[in-house]
Image (spheres, rainbow, N blue to C red):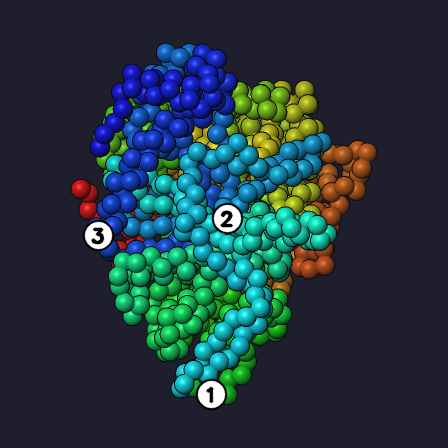
Amino acid sequence: MKSITKDEFMQALETKAQRMFGRTMRTASKSQIYRSVALVVRDLVMERWAYGRELYHESSSRQLCYLSMEFLMGRALGNNLLNLEIEDVLQSVCVDLEVDLEDIRNEEPDAGLGNGGLGRLAACFLDSLSTLGLPAHGCGIRYEYGLFKQKIIDGYQIELPDSWLEDGNVWEVAVPEETEVVKFGGYVERVQQGKKVRYKHRGYQSVKAVPYEVPVLGYQSPLVNSLRLWAARATTHLDMSLFGQGKYMHALEEKELAEVISKLLYPEDTHPEGKALRLKQQYFFVSASIQSVVRNFKLEGHAIHDFACKRVIQINDTHPALAIPELMRILMDQEGLGWEEAWEITTKTFAYTNHTVMEEALEKWPEQIFQELLPRLWQIVYEINERFCKDLWAKYPGDWDRIASMAIIGDKQVKMAHLCIVGSFSVNGVAQLHASILKEMVFNQFFQVFPEKFKGITNGVTFRRFLLKANPDLSALITEKIGGQWILDSVKLKEFAAYAKDPEVCQRVADIRLVNKKRLAAYILDHNNIVVDPHSIYDVQIKRLHEYKRQLLNVFHIIHLYNKLLENPGLEMQPRTFIFAAKAAPGYRMAKLIIKLIHSVGQTINSDKRINDRLKVVFLENYRVSLAELIIPATDVSEQISTAGKEASGTGNMKFMLNGALTIGTLDGANVEIEEEVGAENIFIFGLTSALVNRYYQRGDYDPLAIYHNNSALKQVLDQLVNGFFNFEQQDMFREIYHGLLYGNGGMADPYFLLKDFAEYCEAHDRINTNYGNSDSWWEKSIINIAHAGRFSSDRTISEYNEQIWKLNKVAAK
Ligand code: 26Q
């Protein structure tokens, strides 16, 4: 593949700055330099994209469409530089220009079109699909506002809009000529045409869906896949003549109403509210995507009967579930197929991934909203349900309860997960433990009917972004020792284990970590005005704020350490810096209160001279992909402490391990598999197993109050929440937390078993403390973690999806 020399790059850069901004490199602002650099890189990306598209065209092979409400792409510049293998070129250009490449990179806003794990997984998958040469495209929504920006004021989270498109987005291309029309509301008319019955949708409102494409490069791969993001536009242009009739404002309102559909990403990642606008968003992008998939399929000249041979559609959780009845609608109402054939094709096309077992996060839509907004789809879902229930009746005659609990429509709601299971040929969990929980508990009744559909495919992360790009020095060391094949063949990392006992390599891993920690310390000083010691243990928990993820347990341990230090100033303890970053859903009161608590505890501890800087607590605001890339390579201890059985997989855990952090965690999600890989001596496991958690739930005999009375250290911590220790002026501020744990705020007390796991958690931390003191064994463990991370590459994950579900052929290189 053609590359670019330093001189060519420099020349191109000057030209861009002149043509775009009327500036030379010397007079351009940082933002203008970023955009000039991005435009030069963009030209190279476009060239690859153009040839990549040809590959598609010629092969006419089976293709994947990955439907997701979220794609958490982060920044594109660094990733594109890496995939074009021109980082060094730009680096030396920057040296000549005397500009800091890091500063330039920081000018790019993150594409934050996702809440957390599910969205970032979609982004990692796109990276691996292109790298592996598998023909696929992602389909989602081009939100004008991504996940809110978080500001912390006086310890409280404040949400600000993330207007990431404000200065334009150089990485996207609008394709207005491929606009689709999506219809909402209205009614359905039954029309008899000879022997056939046709259904005509009338009186609807239409909204245009305009696709914007983003190229997704792979590493050393000629295939460039695309991410298609749909933007909502009003169908009618504003009619100025209405102005005279006093109807102008009305027309403006109509336009706004259409365009609001792609305005913003919903920031709730559990407790979904049944908001009509969210359902509109779902149907909007799903309808546009399925229409365009069918259109492109037909343009390739295939017969509609062969649809399921040529296309496969993965639905990322239930959010795109409407794709199932939407394909049925198109096959029947537009292509004229009968129900049986349409259903046969549909159920051979869709595959569904589940990402949660939390009851409250399972999507359900009120019948009425569904019916009013999507009258034709309602009929189709109704019919799917009728037929499914009939089949169940034949299998379980008389078993009403079972049929009622499995039905797609019930309690005046549409159960999206049931629709997905019935309408897909594959249902998968995202880690082995999660898959067994789906089969044995959450979807057990469905597993009995469709055992062949259920699979477990453990998540993975892209090593290109999270090691090669985020931690270039560690990558270079690994490559120096074992060669560079690990970048495309992740299990090769195992060879690095041979260096676990090599003192020189251990020292170099330690030195690289220290440099990364200093870089993070500088960021913390800059953003939080807190001095942290790079020689302290960096103990990190970064993820969405949720009670089940138990940031609170982490805080309790910190308070406990602080108490111990105050009691015994001579205590032998490695200095520790506890780092948090987390966004809370704006309406999630308890999560926001926990953020406030972290700040209150931090303020008390950080300003207490008595503990001699041995403890620090840092909360970094506005957690996002680019911040993760800075924090993870600087982490010593990775906190993965969810209540067992609750975290479907976790993917942050994998990113930390890959960078050599040691995990303290429960036997939850992919932690189980991390332990299998590294062995019990190289991970700090504690706490209840998911089996025990379930036993407590079933028996209802969990008694946190007894634990409180029997563990004086824990009692001290809990009492400090309500005796003004962390907030003298408002002593009741954290009472809700205290009360919820000991007595329950309406529901069960301490439903996430913080009190039960506290003692073991503290013991695990003690082990970390002793281990870090013995630095040889620490770095040995660290290297073993890196070396055994190979299983958690998204390349492996994608290969498994392909072997078990998609069956795509690699597109050959030219
Ligand atoms: C649903 C309806 C209405 C509004 C919002 C939502 C919604 C949005 C996002 C529900 C869930 C999400 C995101 C879930 C998520 O990120 N799950 C995580 O997925 C990861 C990838 O599989 C796993 O590693 C994590 O364990 C899981 O929590």
Task: Give the spatial CA distance, label 2 vs label 3.
Answer: 29 Å
Disc 1: CA contacts within 10 A as few (<14), some (14-19) or many (>=20)? few
Viewer-nearest residue: 530 or 769: 530
For the point 42% across and 39% down, the residue is: 172
Q: Quadrant of residue 358?
A: bottom right
The circle on residue 59 is: 3
Count of labels in the image: 3
Picture layout, residue 153 above or below residue 52: above
Q: SS for tag 2?
A: strand
Q: SS for tag 1?
A: loop
**Are circles 1 and 2 on residues that touch, CB within 8 Å?**
no
- First in residue order: circle 2 vs circle 3: 3
Q: SS for tag 3?
A: helix
Q: Position of 810 compared to 238: left or right?
A: left
> Which quadrant does the N terminus fall into?
top left
Residue type at numbered disc 1: Pro
> Residue 404: where, in percent of width, then height?
54, 78
Residue farthest along the left direction in this orientation: 814
- First in residue order: circle 1 vs circle 2: 2
Disc 2: CA contacts within 10 A as few (<14), some (14-19) or many (>=20)? many
The circle on residue 397 is: 1
For the point 34% across and 21% down, the residue is: 12
Disc 3: CA contacts within 10 A as few (<14), some (14-19) or many (>=20)? few
Viewer-nearest residue: 149 or 222: 222
Task: Give the spatial CA distance, label 1 vs label 2.
Answer: 48 Å
Residue 194 visible in the current orientation: yes
Picture layout, residue 393 above or below residue 631: below
> Residue 9: where, in percent of width, then height?
32, 20
For the point 61% across and 50% down, the residue is: 239
Residue 491 visible in the current orientation: no
Q: Position of 597 compared to 97: left or right?
A: right
The circle on residue 231 is: 2
